[in-house]
């Protein structure tokens, strides 16, 4: 692996691991946090898109826009559910449960894309599900509200899986920068619609909150998810998926030091099983050759060169 790619993956893991910590420091409503995160990120990414990819933007078809809209709607639901879960449960439980999304992607990929996996992949999914049950059971023994937070976190895993499956299809026809900019923009719009019936104001907020909004956009989104997308040009999706397993570890360690939020034994054991299951699935249960994930990126008019974001 080239040194720059390895460094990019390390920075990305450290960045996404800070996401839940920044959210816990904010007093803003979950939908406001998610909206400003998406809006600020989209505004920053729109600059290179407008400078370099206006032609590709004009070539998007109706099918592309439907995929982008569906992906954005799933992402909006994911952010609402996951951020809201942090109000009720621990950082460790919420982050680890959301990391269960590869197992849901396995099922969606089988039903929607016809992808198969090996017996080892199915066994890995069972290990992960058992780990997720242990995490939820530990919180249930503490309080009912923590279990509600775990359910919200699991909903975040389901919705981000829909976002991932839609992205597999959409990313065959566009660069990561173009895809991210359009999806983030539409996601911000959906989040704004979610806020309207509740009368949640977008402004005003103190300077400290705006600093946290910007931190969410820059650290876990641009230096996290965007770097993962960048690395996919040089390493396999399985490698990037394995790298993302460091997110709950970073988040739990930071929560331990900053909030004195020491994980209980069920969270440690369940989280270990869940991460082990994900690691085994990525190693032994990834889709066979010929799946969408293995298809080479398209090139030609309207498509970015291999080195583009």
Image (tube, rainbow, N blue to C red):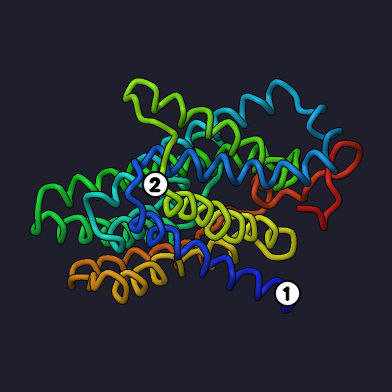
173 to the left or right of 253: right
The vertical placement of 116 against 245, above or below, is: above
The answer, for residue 269, to whether it is visible in the render is: no
Which of these two is toward me, 33 or 68?
33
Which of labels 2 and 1 is toward the front?
A: 1
User: Residue 52, how many percent across, how many down?
Assistant: 85, 43
Q: CA distance from mark 2 to mark 1?
A: 30 Å
Residue labelled with disc 2 = 157
SS category of the residue bearing label 1: helix
For residue 4, the mark is 1
The answer, for residue 265, to whether it is visible in the render is: yes
Q: Quadrant of the N terminus?
A: bottom right
User: Residue 90, how many percent across, how many down?
Assistant: 25, 59
Hey, which residue is sitting farthest bottom in the picture?
3
Q: How many marks?
A: 2
For residue 279, the mark is none
Task: Kindly identify the residue that appears in the image at 17 percent across and 49 percent down.
Answer: 147
Which of these two is toward me, 264 or 204?
204
User: Residue 179, how many percent across, how many down?
Assistant: 68, 40
The vertical placement of 87 against 273, above or below, is: above
Which of these two is toward me, 170 or 190?
190
User: Residue 183, how many percent across, how many down?
Assistant: 61, 36
Task: Kindly identify the residue that appears in the image at 42 percent across and 50 percent down.
Answer: 209
Q: Earlier in the sequence, mark 2 or mark 1?
A: 1
The vertical placement of 52 against 281, above or below, is: above
Task: Kindly identify the residue that appears in the image at 39 percent across and 58 percent down.
Answer: 20
Task: Kindly identify the residue that appears in the image at 74 percent across and 64 percent down.
Answer: 234
């Amino acid at each position: 692996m080239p040194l720059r790619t390895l460094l990019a993956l390390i920075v990305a893991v450290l960045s996404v691991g800070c996401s839940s910590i920044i959210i816990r420091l904010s007093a803003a409503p979950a939908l406001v946090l998610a909206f400003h995160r998406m809006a600020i990120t989209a505004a920053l990414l729109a600059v290179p898109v407008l400078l370099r990819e206006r032609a590709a933007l004009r070539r998007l078809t109706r099918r592309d826009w439907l995929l982008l809209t569906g992906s954005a709607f799933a992402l909006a639901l994911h952010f609402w559910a996951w951020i809201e879960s942090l109000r009720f449960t621990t950082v460790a439980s919420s982050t680890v449960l959301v990391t269960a999304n590869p197992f849901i992607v396995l099922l969606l990929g089988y039903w929607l894309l016809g992808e198969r996996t090996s017996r080892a992949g199915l066994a890995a999914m069972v290990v992960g599900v058992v780990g997720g049950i242990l995490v939820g059971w530990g919180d249930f023994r503490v309080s009912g509200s923590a279990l509600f937070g775990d359910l919200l976190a699991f909903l975040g895993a389901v919705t981000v899986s829909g976002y991932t499956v839609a992205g597999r299809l959409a990313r065959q026809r566009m660069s990561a920068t173009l895809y991210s900019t359009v999806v983030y923009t539409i996601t911000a719009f959906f989040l704004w619609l979610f806020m309207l019936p509740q009368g949640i104001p977008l402004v005003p907020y103190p300077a400290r909150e705006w600093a946290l909004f910007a931190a969410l956009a820059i650290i876990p989104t641009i230096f996290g998810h965007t770097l993962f997308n960048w690395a996919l040009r040089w390493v396999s999706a399985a490698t990037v998926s394995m790298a993302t397993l460091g997110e709950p570890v970073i988040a739990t360690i930071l929560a331990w030091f900053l909030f004195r939020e020491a994980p209980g034994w069920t969270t440690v054991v369940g989280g270990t099983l869940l991460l082990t299951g994900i690691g085994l699935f990525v190693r032994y249960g990834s889709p066979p050759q010929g799946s969408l994930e293995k298809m080479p990126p398209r090139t030609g008019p309207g498509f970015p060169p291999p080195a583009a974001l």
